[in-house]
Image: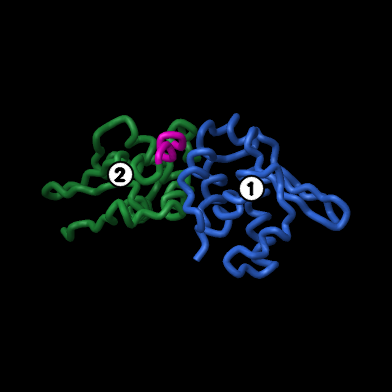
Chain colours: A blue, B green
Amino acid sequence: MRAPQHPDREQFSLVSVLHGLSDPARLEIVRLLATVPERACTDFHGIGGLTVPTLSHHLRVLRECGVTRTRIDGKHRYVSLRRDDLELRFPGVLDAIIEAAPTQAVD
Amino acid sequence: MRAPQHPDREQFSLVSVLHGLSDPARLEIVRLLATVPERACTDFHGIGGLTVPTLSHHLRVLRECGVTRTRIDGKHRYVSLRRDDLELRFPGVLDAIIEAAPTQAVD
C-alpha cells in the first residue's frame, strides 16, 4: 500500500480547507473524527450510503487539504484530524465549524 | 433592476456558506466587507483582475448562501456582510475565517 502524502502545515491554504469542508459527507467525517483520536476508514462506510470509491475520494480531499492525516497499519487505514496544525494556521476555524456542523449533515 | 433575493437566516446551510467562502476572490470580497458597513459593488472591480460577469457571479454566490446582503439604491448596488445572521446560525465561524484570511487572497 503506497504511503499517503500529506501537505506540510505551511502549505495549507484556507481556501482549500474551506473547500474540503464544504461537502455534507466530508463535514460528517470531520464531525465523527472530532471526538476520537482516530478512526478506521471502514468506520465511515455507514455515512449516507456512500460507495467505497466515493468515500475514498472524500478522504483524499480531506487529506490533501490538510484537514486529516491517514495512517497505514498493516492492511488497515486510520484517519485523524490534524487539529493542532489547523489551529496553528487558522486559529478557531475548525473548532467553530465542528461546533456549528449539524449532527447529521448527510441526507 | 430586479430586487435581489436573500435566504432567510433559518435557510442557511453550513456547507453552502463554506462553499461560498472557498474561493480566493469571494474570500477577498468578504475580507474587504469585514471592516465597513457596506461597499458599492464597483469597489470590487479591482480584485485580481476579475471581469464584471465573474464578479457578479461571485457576489451572487455570496448572496445566495447568506453571507452577504445586496441593497439597491437607484442605479447602484451596495453589498454588506450578514454578520449578525451568520453569528446566530454558526457562532464564531465567519469571524474565525475573516481573521485567518490572507490579506490578499487573490493572486
Position of residue A92 in the picture relative to residue B83 (left or right): right
Position of residue B81 in the picture relative to residue A59 (left or right): left
Residue B13 seen in render: yes
Q: What is the chain identity of the residue bearing mark 2?
A: B
- In the rendering, at what x and y percent does residue B106 appear? 47, 40
User: The disc labelled 1 sits on which kind of residue?
Assistant: Leu
The residue that appears at 50% across and 40% down in the rendered structure is B107
The residue that appears at 39% across and 36% down in the rendered structure is B31
Query: Is residue A72 shown above or below B104?
Result: below
Q: Which residues are magenta?
A: B91-97
- In the rendering, at what x and y percent does residue B4 appear? 22, 56
**Quarter that holds the N terminus of chain B:** bottom left
Q: What is the chain identity of the residue bearing mark 1?
A: A
Secondary structure type for disc 2: helix
- Would you identify the image quadrant in which residue B16 lies? bottom left
Secondary structure type for disc 1: helix
Q: Foreground residue, B28 or B85?
A: B85
The residue that appears at 70% across and 42% down in the rendered structure is A37
* Residue A70 is inside the magenta segment: no
State the residue position of label 1: A33
